Image (tube, rainbow, N blue to C red):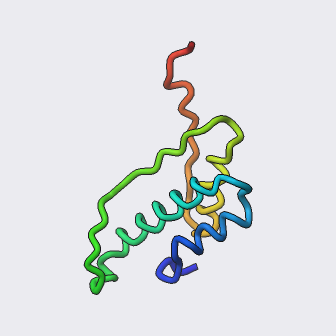
């Protein structure tokens, strides 16, 4: 898939095929990924004067809510590598 041909709506539509619920998360994640790629390809989009600043996405939620599935599904669609890390060992117990 060529990124230049993809819109946030198309990214969300792809997620809708594989992830049940989580509509707000899918919208925010789709726009965030789209803006990330748009920023990367800004040199090629010289006719676009929109300035996009680097931003990060933090997915927070209980176990089994679909955080990893969202990331893995979009990574597969965009054919990009992904690393999933467990940060529970970085917090104090209790």
Q: Residue furthest bottom?
A: 47
Q: Quick one: quadrant of the N terminus?
A: bottom right
The residue shown at (70%, 54%) is: 21
- Residue 44 sits in quarter: bottom left
Q: How many marks?
A: 0
Observer-nearest residue: 5 or 31? 31
Q: Position of residue 15 (x, y in %)?
A: 66, 64
Up-down: is 6 above or below 89?
below
Q: Does residue 31 appear to the left or right of 15 in the view shown?
A: left
The residue shown at (55%, 25%) is: 89
The residue shown at (46%, 50%) is: 57
Q: Does residue 4 appear to the left or right of 17 in the view shown?
A: left
Observer-nearest residue: 82 or 63? 63
Q: Position of residue 86 (x, y in %)?
A: 58, 35
Observer-nearest residue: 33 or 75? 33
Q: Position of residue 34 (x, y in %)?
A: 46, 68
Up-down: is 43 above or below 33?
below
The residue shown at (41%, 66%) is: 35
Up-down: is 69 above or below 5?
above
Up-down: is 5 above or below 73?
below
Q: Does residue 29 appear to the left or right of 36 in the view shown?
A: right
Q: Quick one: quadrant of the C terminus?
A: top right
Q: Position of residue 56 (x, y in %)?
A: 41, 51
Q: Residue furthest top?
A: 94
């Amino acid at each position: 898939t060529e990124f230049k041909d993809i819109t946030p709506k198309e990214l969300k539509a792809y997620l809708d095929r594989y992830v049940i619920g989580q509509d707000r998360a899918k919208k925010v994640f789709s726009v965030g990924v789209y803006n990330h790629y748009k920023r990367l390809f800004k040199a090629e989009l010289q006719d676009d004067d929109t300035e996009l600043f680097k931003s990060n996405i933090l997915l927070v939620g209980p176990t089994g809510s679909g955080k990893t599935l969202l990331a893995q599904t979009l990574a597969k669609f965009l054919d990009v590598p992904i690393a999933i890390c467990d940060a529970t060992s970085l917090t104090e117990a209790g």
